[in-house]
Image (cartoon, rainbow, N blue to C red):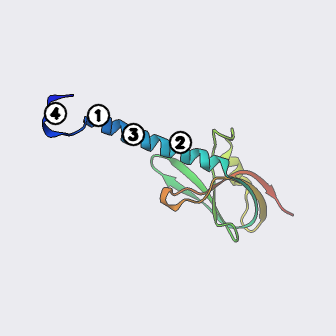
């Protein structure tokens, strides 16, 4: 025990930081696992689509729907999907689609269900 801790009865600040970092890592890892494991197939009419430009995280492709809320089209390392721009271009406003989605809407983290697959409903 250091002389400082002995005199003041405190704990070593390094252990406090290690504990805080461990809690944050566990939270974000658990959140991401829960996000990608939440799979769903939904049928929605697209009312609008737009791009959100963010300085550090790049462009986000968003799709507004009548019944399903706002969805996002993104790349995913977990699903080996690297074609978000192509999937986004495939979606047309006014059409109805069957979307395979992953994740959930979590306003605090600004996350949306992610569109993994797109099929137009005729």
Specify the label residue 29 is tagged with. 2
Mark 1 Cα shell of 10 Å, populated few (<14), some (14-19), many (≥20): few
Q: Which residue is denoted by mark 4 in the rendering?
A: 6
User: In this rendering, which labeled residue sits more in front, label 4 or label 1?
Assistant: 4
For the residues marked 3 and 1, what is the alpha-carbon distance in whole angstroms? 11 Å
Q: Compare residues 108 and 83 and report the one nearer the observer.
A: 108
Q: Compare residues 105 and 1 and report the one nearer the observer.
A: 1
For the residues marked 4 and 3, what is the alpha-carbon distance in whole angstroms? 25 Å
Is residue 106 shown above or below 77? below
User: In this rendering, which labeled residue sits more in front, label 4 or label 3?
Assistant: 4
- Helix, strand or loop at mark 1: helix
Specify the label residue 85 is tagged with. none
Q: Compare residues 4 and 74 and report the one nearer the observer.
A: 4
The picture places residue 117, in percent across and down from the top left corner, at: 75, 50
Q: Which residue is denoted by mark 3 in the rendering?
A: 21
Q: Are marks 2 and 1 in contact (CB under 8 Å)?
A: no
For the residues marked 3 and 2, what is the alpha-carbon distance in whole angstroms? 12 Å
């Amino acid at each position: 025990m250091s002389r400082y801790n002995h005199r003041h009865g405190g704990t070593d600040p390094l252990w406090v930081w290690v504990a805080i970092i461990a809690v944050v890592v566990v939270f974000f890892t658990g959140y991401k696992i829960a996000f990608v494991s939440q799979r769903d197939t939904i049928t929605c009419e697209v009312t609008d689509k737009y791009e959100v430009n963010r300085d550090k995280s790049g462009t986000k492709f968003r799709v507004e729907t009548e019944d399903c809320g706002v969805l996002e089209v993104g790349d995913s390392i977990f699903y080996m999907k690297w074609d978000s721009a192509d999937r986004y271009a495939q979606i047309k406003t006014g059409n109805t689609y069957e979307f395979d989605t992953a994740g959930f809407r979590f306003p605090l983290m600004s996350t949306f269900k992610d569109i993994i697959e797109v099929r137009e409903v005729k």
